[in-house]
């Protein structure tokens, strides 16, 4: 049985100075200012974790630590238009947010500190508009992976695949769930190999748990998109260009057929830390990718955010100045319409800001 509880929505209006956005020209020259977009949530002593857009794209939902070091958290929603912040839930240690592609409810997990039995993790979902929170399940041990299918029938909690319609569970192999196919019949999964660093890209049937090994390069970046029930897996290669610079070639491989095609190239990239993170837009037409380029001794060190709409060339949309070891930037998460991107900027010591770049 699903328990439903009502929580009042608490509002706090944050008055922030907007970060001046520079033009989207080439940011590789010395002395260029950062082009981060609009600051939605400034850095604070509490860490910001995970983020997901609401279905209508009006708010970004994220997890915020209330007091650093305590584990107390809030599930907050910030308005892209007004920067008003409201709290949707205040369970301790919230983590692992997920929303179905066409759904409004946001799924999340929370660690319970004083459970009366062996269950110490609670899986819930919240309707952002009404504030209604539904408790779906409790279980023991830690939860690091939470995933929901587009039709909200199937739920992955770590190594368990739950059919919410039939109330059944299928055990999954050691590894990590990556994404459901649009029709919910297939689960893209990273299967761990014992004593081997590479992972196996696999499709698992949600109907009977049967699996199909996919084509891949021995590893794949978790950014992917679907063509029918066939996942297109991102991969990267490095072409030596002299000195210690490389050209990064980003391509994708059809997991079922093995057909490969190039997505983009990024020159003047320092070694193996060139590719920072990548995500596809909900419609699978645009790829957002962080790429670190150029060098500090040339005063041209930048981590740049590009958007690629294949077969078009990459478009520079944002840039950041790297700190120690490179700019620490969270995955670029597209809005439902694909015209905005939200991401975290890490300041160190568990201090993070939340930015949005619109008009992409």
Image (cartoon, rainbow, N blue to C red):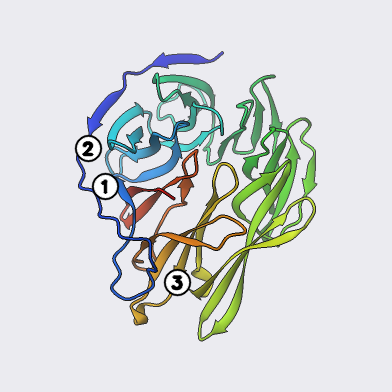
Return the mark for residue 14: 2
Within-10-Å neighbours for mark 1: few <14, some 14–19, many 20+: some
Query: What residue is shown with label 3?
Result: 293
Crowdedness of circle 2 by 10 Å Cα count: few (<14), some, many (20+)?
some
| Distance (Cα) linking label 3 and label 2 | 34 Å
For image coordinates 69% across by 39% down, the residue present is 187
Camera sees residue 73? no
* Badge count: 3
Most extreme residue toward the bottom, as rendered? 243
Dividing the picture into quadrants, the one containing residue 193 is bottom right
Which residue is located at x 35 percent, y 48 percent? 355
Q: Position of residue 302 (x, y in %)?
A: 39, 69
- For label 1, the residue is 42
Nearest the camera: 284 or 2? 284
Residue contact between numbered discs 3 and 2, judged by CB atoms under 8 Å: no
Q: Where does residue 173 sit, x and y in percent of width and height?
A: 70, 43
Mark 2 element type: loop
């Amino acid at each position: 049985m699903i328990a439903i509880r009502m929580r009042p929505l608490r509002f706090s209006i944050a008055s922030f100075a907007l970060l001046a956005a520079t033009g989207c020209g080439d940011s590789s020259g010395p002395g260029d200012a950062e082009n981060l977009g609009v600051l939605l949530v400034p850095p604070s002593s509490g860490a910001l974790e995970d983020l997901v857009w609401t279905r209508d794209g009006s708010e970004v939902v994220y997890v915020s630590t209330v007091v650093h070091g305590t584990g107390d958290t809030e599930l907050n929603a910030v308005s892209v238009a007004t920067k008003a912040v409201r709290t949707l839930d205040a369970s301790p240690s919230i983590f692992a947010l997920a929303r179905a592609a066409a759904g409004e409810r946001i799924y999340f997990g929370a660690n319970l500190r004083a459970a009366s039995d062996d269950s110490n993790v609670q899986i819930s979902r919240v309707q952002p508009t009404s504030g209604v929170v539904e408790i779906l399940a409790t279980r023991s041990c830690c939860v690091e992976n939470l995933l929901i299918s587009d039709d909200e029938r199937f739920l992955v909690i770590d190594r368990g695949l739950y059919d919410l319609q039939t109330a059944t569970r299928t055990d999954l192999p050691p590894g990590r769930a990556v994404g459901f196919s649009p029709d919910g019949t297939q689960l893209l999964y990273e299967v761990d190999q014992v004593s081997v660093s590479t992972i196996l890209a696999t499709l698992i049937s949600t109907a009977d748990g049967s699996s199909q090994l996919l084509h891949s390069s021995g590893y794949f970046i978790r950014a992917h998109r679907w063509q029918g029930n066939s996942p297109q897996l991102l991969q990267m290669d490095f072409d030596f260009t002299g000195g210690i610079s490389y050209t990064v070639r980003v391509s994708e491989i059809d997991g079922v057929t093995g057909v490969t095609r190039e997505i983009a190239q990024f020159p003047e990239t320092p070694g193996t830390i060139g590719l920072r993170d990548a995500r596809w837009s909900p419609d699978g037409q645009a790829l957002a990718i962080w790429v670190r380029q150029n060098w500090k001794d040339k005063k041209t060190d930048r981590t740049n955010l590009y958007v690629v709409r294949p077969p078009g060339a990459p478009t520079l949309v944002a840039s950041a100045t790297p700190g120690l070891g490179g700019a620490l930037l969270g995955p670029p998460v597209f809005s439902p319409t694909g015209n905005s991107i939200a991401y975290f900027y890490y300041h160190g010591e568990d201090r993070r800001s939340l930015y949005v770049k619109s008009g992409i």
